C-alpha cells in the first residue's frame, strides 16, 4: 500500500519529523516499510508559454516554457494533450529518471535538428503512476520552478499485516502515528458517523439474497456532470500511483484511500430495475471493468439488476454499468461483504483489486454510511447534481466488538514496566478506545482487539519497547507431552544422522501426480485432501505421506550427480475419512539408494543396498522386537508391514519395501530404492521409553551351530520368532550366519533351503559344563523338530 506523506499531513502535522524518523515510527507501530519513493532532483514545475510545430517532424512540437529562472527554456515535445498556459513537470538536464538498469539521465541535445534543453514528462515517466500517455497536467496555482518533490512529497510503500485492515487507509495510518507521537488528529478519528437520515430499502429498490453480504447502502444522485477531476484530487491520487479517470470515479478512489471503505458508482441509465445482491448462478458470466469476461460459480457474490450481474460484489465493477462521460444519474454503493467469500472469489478468478484487498481483510462495516456521506458531499461539490435526502439501507452491520477488561496491575505485570494507570488510559484513548467502568469499549475499526493481552500489546507498542526494562527471569516448567514428543524426534534425528542419513524438509503440498508415489498405505479407507483454492497445479493436495517428497529429493540429487543417498524426513501428513473429516498424523520416512559403502581405492565389490540394509536401520530406530511381515502391495516390491512386539499386542507402525524398478527408472535411478514410512505416535507408544542396560558377561559362553533344512517358502523370521519365545534360561543369544539354496537340486532339493544358526549358551553366575550345554542344546533341537518340523544337516 502506498501512503503519501502530504496526504498524511491532512490529518497530523509531521513537518518537524525527518523521513528517517517517520520510517522508525511506522516500524515501531508494527507497519513494515518496504521502501520510500522520492521524486528525483532537477524535476520542477514549468509553464508552457508557447507551442509551435516542429519544422521537420509532424508529431513533434517546439515549446518555450517558464522554469522559474526568468529565462524561457526551449523543449521539443511529442505530446498533444497540453495547451499553452498549462503547467507540467519538467526534467532539467542532469535529472535521472527511471530506476536501476532502466534509468537514464536527461541531457541537452537536438531532436530532428532542433535544440531541446530538458524534457516535459508524463506521470509514468517520473514514477508517479503507470500512465505514460500524454503530459501530466499540474495545478495552475503552482509557481514555475517549484521542485516537484515539494508538490509530491515522499511516498511510503507499506506492508500491512492481515490483522490490521484499519491501517489500509491514510486516516488509519495517521491515527497510528498520532498515537505514537502524542498528537491530536486534525479531524475525527474516523468518518464513520453519518448525518444523513437512513431509510430501510423496499424490495423493488435493494434486496439481499445471500449471507455473504450483511449490509448494503445506496444513494441516488441525479444531474451530475462527469468531467476531469480538479488538480488537487488528481495530485492526491497520482501521488500514490493511481491514474485519474473522471471526477466521480476519482472520488470513490479518494474515499477508498482516505478511510479504507470501497465504494462503487453505477450509471443509473444502464440499470434496469432495483439492485439485488445474490450468489451467481450456474454458468453465469460477468464482463468486468478490466474488459475480461469471467465465468462465475455458485458462491460468488454479484450485484445484479433485472438483466444480470452488473458488479462482482467487493471485487470489481462491470464494464456495462460503469460511469462514463455521458452519465448524468448515478447510484452510489457502500456495503460490507463477508471477507471469506471475497477472498475465495478473488483468488479463484485471479482478480486482486484495491477493494478486494480490503474486503478480504475485513472492512469496518460501521463506516459504510459515513463513507457514502463523504463521497456524496464531494460529488455534489465537484460534479454538481442533487442527492436524495435519505440513504437507503438493506441489512445491518455486524455487532460492534465486545468491551475488554484491563486492569493496570495486569498490564504492568505482563509488560514488566512501571507504567501508571493514567498513562495506560492516555494510550488506549489515543487509539480510539473508550473507558467504560473497568472495561474498554473497542472501536469498530479495531476488530483485532479481543482479549486483555491484546490491549497490553497496544500499550507496550505505544509506550515503546525500548522503555521496558530488560530482565532475566526463569521459572520451572513441568515436562509436557509436547516436550516428550520433541525429545523423541530429536533422538531419532541424532540416531539417523549417526548412521549417515541427511534430513530433508519438503512442502506439505504436493501435486495430484505425486499421489501415486505415496507408499504409506496406513490409511485404509482414507482419501487424500485436495485444496479448494490451490495456488497452482503442482501444489493442489495436502501430502498423505512423506515418501513422495523423498522421491522428488532423490530424483533431483541423482540428476545432479549424487546417486548414493540416505534421506529421512519427519513431518505431518493429512488424510480425509470416508465422512470427509480431515485428520493429521506425525510420520517418519526413510529412503536409501546407491552403493552400500563409499567409493575407495581399497574397495573390491562395494555391493548395492538391499532390504536387509533397510531392516538394519529400522532395528536402530525401533529397538528389539521389530518384525517385517510380508504383505501384498503392487506399489512396492518386497513390501513388508513393520510391526513392533509380538502376538496380538504387536503394534503396526508402517510399511517398508523397494520402489518398483519401473518407477525408479522414471526417476533416472539405476539402483534399488528402499523406502519405509512409520507413524511416529505409534512408534513412540510401542517402543520402550527407558533404555535397559546389561553388564558385560562375567563368565564365558559356549556356542553350538545348527544347520536346518526348511521349505524355501519359510521365512527366517519365523525361526527367529520361535527362538525369541523359547524358554531356556541358559540360551543367551542366537544369530543367522548362513543361507544355502541349490536351484539345480544336486546338493539340496530345489524347494528347500538350509539356514545355519549360531546358538550361544551362558550362565550369569558360573561357568557352564559341557554336559549342561549339550542337554540344553538337545532339548532345543527336539523342540524345533516338533514345532517347526525342520530337518538337520
Image (cartoon, rainbow, N blue to C red):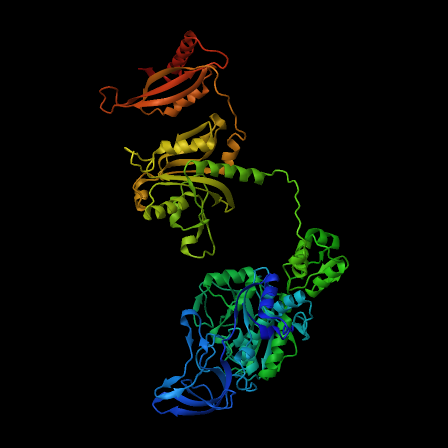
Residue 38 placed where, x, y %?
Answer: 52, 73
Q: Is residue 204 above or below residue 755?
A: below
Residue extending furthest toward the top: 771
Residue 438 placed where, x, y %?
Answer: 76, 57
Q: Is residue 499 above or below residue 44?
A: above
Identified at 47% across, 56% down, the residue is: 533
Is residue 363 something that shows in the picture?
no
Quarter of image, res 429: bottom right
Q: Is residue 44 above or below residue 253?
A: below
**Is 718 or 50 nearer to us in this picture?**
50
Residue 476 placed where, x, y %?
Answer: 65, 40
Identified at 73% across, 61% down, the residue is: 423
**Is 93 or 506 nearer to us in this picture?**
93
Q: Quadrant of the N terminus?
A: bottom right
Is residue 494 something that shows in the picture?
yes
Residue 559 placed where, x, y %?
Answer: 32, 48
Left or right of 72 on screen, residue 27: right
Tally of numbered tags:
0
Q: Quadrant of the C terminus?
A: top left
**Is 304 or 452 nearer to us in this picture?**
452
Q: Is residue 756 above or below residue 403?
A: above
**Is 762 or 450 nearer to us in this picture?**
762
Quarter of image, res 62: bottom left
Amino acid at each position: 500500500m502506498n501512503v503519501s506523506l502530504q496526504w498524511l499531513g491532512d490529518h497530523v502535522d509531521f513537518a518537524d519529523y525527518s523521513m528517517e524518523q517517520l520510517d522508525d515510527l511506522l516500524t515501531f507501530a508494527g507497519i513494515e516499510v518496504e521502501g520510500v519513493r522520492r521524486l528525483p532532483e532537477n524535476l520542477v514545475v514549468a509553464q508552457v508559454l508557447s507551442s509551435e510545430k516542429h519544422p521537420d517532424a509532424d508529431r513533434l512540437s517546439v515549446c518555450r516554457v517558464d522554469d522559474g529562472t526568468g529565462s524561457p527554456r526551449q523543449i521539443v515535445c511529442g505530446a498533444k494533450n497540453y495547451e499553452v498556459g498549462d503547467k507540467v513537470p519538467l526534467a532539467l538536464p542532469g535529472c535521472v529518471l527511471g530506476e536501476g538498469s532502466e534509468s537514464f539521465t536527461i541531457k541537452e541535445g537536438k531532436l530532428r535538428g532542433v535544440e531541446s534543453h530538458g524534457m516535459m514528462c508524463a506521470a509514468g515517466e517520473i514514477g508517479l503512476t503507470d500512465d505514460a500517455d500524454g503530459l501530466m497536467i499540474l495545478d495552475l496555482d503552482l509557481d514555475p520552478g517549484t521542485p516537484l518533490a515539494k508538490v509530491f512529497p515522499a511516498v511510503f510503500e507499506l506492508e500491512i499485516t492481515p490483522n490490521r485492515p484499519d491501517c489500509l487507509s491514510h486516516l488509519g495510518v495517521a491515527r497510528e502515528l498520532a498515537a505514537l507521537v502524542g498528537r491530536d488528529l486534525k479531524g475525527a478519528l474516523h468518518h464513520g458517523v453519518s448525518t444523513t437520515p437512513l431509510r430501510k430499502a423496499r424490495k423493488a429498490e435493494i434486496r439481499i439474497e445471500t449471507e455473504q453480504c450483511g449490509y448494503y447502502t445506496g444513494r441516488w444522485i441525479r444531474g451530475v456532470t462527469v468531467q476531469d477531476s480538479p488538480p488537487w484530487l488528481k495530485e492526491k491520487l497520482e501521488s500514490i500511483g493511481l491514474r485519474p479517470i473522471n471526477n466521480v470515479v476519482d472520488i470513490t478512489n479518494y474515499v477508498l484511500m482516505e478511510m479504507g471503505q470501497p465504494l462503487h458508482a453505477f450509471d443509473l441509465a444502464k440499470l434496469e430495475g432495483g439492485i439485488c445482491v445474490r450468489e451467481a448462478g450456474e454458468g453465469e458470466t460477468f464482463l468486468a471493468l478490466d474488459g475480461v469476461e469471467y465465468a462465475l460459480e455458485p458462491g460468488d457474490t454479484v450485484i445484479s439488476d433485472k438483466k444480470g450481474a452488473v458488479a462482482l460484489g467487493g471485487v470489481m465493477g462491470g464494464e456495462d454499468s460503469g460511469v462514463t462521460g455521458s452519465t448524468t444519474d448515478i447510484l452510489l454503493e457502500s456495503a460490507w461483504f463477508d471477507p471469506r467469500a471475497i477472498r475465495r472469489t478473488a483468488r479463484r478468478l485471479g482478480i486482486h483489486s484495491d477493494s478486494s484487498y480490503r474486503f478480504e481483510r475485513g472492512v469496518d462495516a460501521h463506516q459504510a454510511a459515513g463513507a457514502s456521506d463523504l463521497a456524496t458531499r464531494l460529488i455534489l461539490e465537484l460534479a454538481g447534481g442533487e442527492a436524495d435526502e435519505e440513504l437507503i439501507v438493506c441489512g445491518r452491520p455486524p455487532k460492534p466488538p465486545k468491551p475488554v477488561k484491563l486492569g493496570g496491575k495486569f498490564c504492568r505485570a505482563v509488560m514488566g514496566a512501571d507504567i501508571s494507570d493514567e498513562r495506560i488510559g492516555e494510550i488506549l484513548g489515543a487509539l480510539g478506545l473508550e473507558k467504560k467502568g473497568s472495561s474498554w469499549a473497542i472501536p469498530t475499526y479495531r476488530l483485532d482487539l479481543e482479549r486483555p493481552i491484546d490491549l497490553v500489546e497496544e500499550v507496550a507498542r505505544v509506550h515503546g519497547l525500548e522503555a521496558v526494562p530488560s530482565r532475566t527471569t526463569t521459572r520451572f516448567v513441568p515436562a509436557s507431552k509436547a516436550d516428550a514428543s520433541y525429545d523423541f524426534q530429536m533422538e531419532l534425528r541424532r540416531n539417523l544422522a549417526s548412521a549417515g542419513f541427511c534430513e530433508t524438509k519438503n512442502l506439505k503440498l504436493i501435486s495430484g501426480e505425486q499421489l501415486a508415489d505415496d507408499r504409506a498405505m496406513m490409511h485404509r479407507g482414507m482419501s487424500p485432501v485436495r485444496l479448494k483454492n490451490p495456488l497452482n497445479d503442482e501444489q493442489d493436495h495436502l501430502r498423505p505421506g512423506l515418501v513422495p517428497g523423498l522421491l522428488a529429493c532423490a530424483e533431483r540429487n541423482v540428476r545432479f550427480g549424487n546417486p548414493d543417498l540416505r534421506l529421512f524426513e519427519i513431518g505431518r501428513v493429512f488424510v480425509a475419512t470416508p465422512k470427509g473429516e480431515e485428520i493429521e498424523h506425525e510420520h517418519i520416512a526413510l529412503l536409501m539408494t546407491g552403493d552400500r559403502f563409499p567409493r575407495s581405492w581399497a574397495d573390491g565389490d562395494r555391493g548395492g543396498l538391499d532390504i536387509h540394509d533397510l531392516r538394519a536401520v529400522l532395528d536402530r530406530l525401533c529397538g528389539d522386537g521389530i518384525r517385517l511381515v510380508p504383505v501384498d502391495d503392487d506399489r512396492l516390491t518386497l513390501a513388508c508391514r513393520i510391526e513392533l512386539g509380538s502376538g496380538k499386542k504387536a503394534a503396526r507402525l508402517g510399511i517398508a519395501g523397494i520402489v518398483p524398478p519401473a518407477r525408479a527408472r522414471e526417476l533416472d535411478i539405476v539402483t534399488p530404492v528402499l523406502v519405509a514410512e512409520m507413524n511416529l505416535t505409534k512408534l513412540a507408544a510401542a517402543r520402550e521409553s527407558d533404555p535397559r542396560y546389561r553388564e558385560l558377561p562375567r563368565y564365558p559362553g559356549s556356542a553350538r551351530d545348527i544347520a536346518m533344512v526348511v521349505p524355501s517358502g519359510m521365512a527366517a523370521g519365523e525361526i527367529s520368532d520361535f527362538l525369541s519365545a523359547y524358554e531356556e534360561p541358559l540360551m543367551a543369544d542366537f544369530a543367522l550366519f548362513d543361507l544355502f539354496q541349490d536351484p539345480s537340486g544336486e546338493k539340496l532339493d530345489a524347494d528347500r533351503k538350509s539356514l545355519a544358526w549360531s546358538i550361544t549358551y551362558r550362565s550369569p553366575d558360573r561357568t557352564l559344563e559341557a554336559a549342561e550345554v549339550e542337554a540344553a542344546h538337545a532339548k532345543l533341537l527336539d523342540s524345533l523338530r516338533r514345532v517347526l518340523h525342520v530337518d538337520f544337516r
